[in-house]
Image (cartoon, helix red, strand yellow):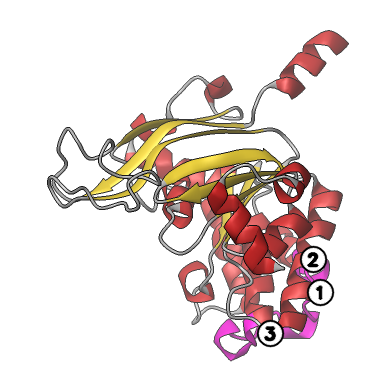
Amino acid sequence: MNRDMDKAEEQPLLKVRDLSMIYGGTCNHCLELTGPETGGNICTCCGSIVACGHVSLDVYPGEIVGIVGESGSGKSTLIKSLYFDELPTFGQVFLQSFEEGETNLLSVSDQKKRWLRNHKMGIVYQNPYLGLNMDFSCGGNIAEKLLTADYYHVGKIRARATELLIKTEIPLGRMDHLPKYFSGGMQQRVQISKALANNPPLLLLDEITTGLDVSVQAQILDLIRQLQRQLGVTMVVVSHDFAVIRMLTDRTFVMKNGRVVENGLTDQVMEDPQHAYTQLLINSML
């Protein structure tokens, strides 16, 4: 029995295979005429934009994986594809906690996709206005996520909201206040609370410190590390900032022009980058 448990723990929670997102009228040459080797992601044959091309990765239970790259590298498109905000042109995505990881999530019905978002995933966007209803109270946003995840007991919803606000260090006296009157850092804390409300196996974080003051960035990053230690939730973190990736992640995938150009343990990638683009990113941080 222990061997079976060990085997189950070795299975990736998330598997992404050959995921590609092409905007525009695609042709047979889009993927071969774009990428780091060609210096761009616009197909010179048909003019389509290849936001992601042949991206594959595994994420294991309890792991924090980083996706890093400059603006336009395809990292945010990848995250949005995983959360069904975008529908990839082709590819496969498997989640171990859904139908034993044997069903391609991109092939299920829209109803099933909504169910997966509400029960198996959480997301924190760079712009809090994408993740929060600014006309709902702080507690109301958390309740909204819980209701979609089939929590209907008002007392339990209120208790869960209280628990999450304490974890994310938001004063309980602000529970019934509208987040549009909060600071940027506090709005991100509310987003994190909402994203964690349904106890998702997978949490997606998209450039969540961009635009925040340095001191607030540090507070948000410390909070994420603390929550990951407490809850053991698996995370995929997207950032253009290698300092954020170094602070949070176990493994890192480096993207450029829609392709993964390097991946490995974060410490190894940081200390001994193999690809010229990775070297450039790290040197620009020093």
240 w.r.t. 3: above or below: below
Q: Could you tell me which secondary element the residue under label 3 belongs to? A: loop
Left or right of residue 101: residue 111: left
Q: Earlier in the sequence, mark 2 or mark 3?
A: 3
Taking the magenta stretch, the answer to whether it contains residue 163 is yes
130 w.r.t. 204: above or below: below
The CA span between labels 2 and 3 is 15 Å
Residue 191 in the image: state x and y as whole percent.
Answer: 61, 68
100 w.r.t. 222: above or below: above
Which residue is painted at 13% across and 46% down in the image? 25
Between marks 1 and 3 in the image, the one whose residue lies nearer the viewer: 3
Taking the magenta stretch, the answer to whether it contains residue 63 is no
The CA span between labels 1 and 3 is 18 Å
Q: Are marks 1 and 2 in contact (CB under 8 Å)?
A: yes
Q: Which residues are magenta?
A: 162-184
Left or right of residue 42: residue 235: right
Q: Quadrant of the N terminus?
A: top right
Q: Earlier in the sequence, mark 1 or mark 3?
A: 1
Residue to which mark 2 is pinned: 223
Residue to which mark 1 is pinned: 169
The CA span between labels 1 and 2 is 9 Å
Between marks 1 and 2 in the image, the one whose residue lies nearer the viewer: 2
Q: Earlier in the sequence, mark 1 or mark 2?
A: 1
Q: What's under tag 3, amino acid-wise?
A: Asp
Say the numbered circle drawn on residue 213: 3
Which residue is painted at 67% across and 67% down in the image? 285
Q: Residues within 10 Å of mark 2 (few under 14, many from 20)?
A: some
Residue 246 in the image: state x and y as whole percent.
Answer: 74, 56
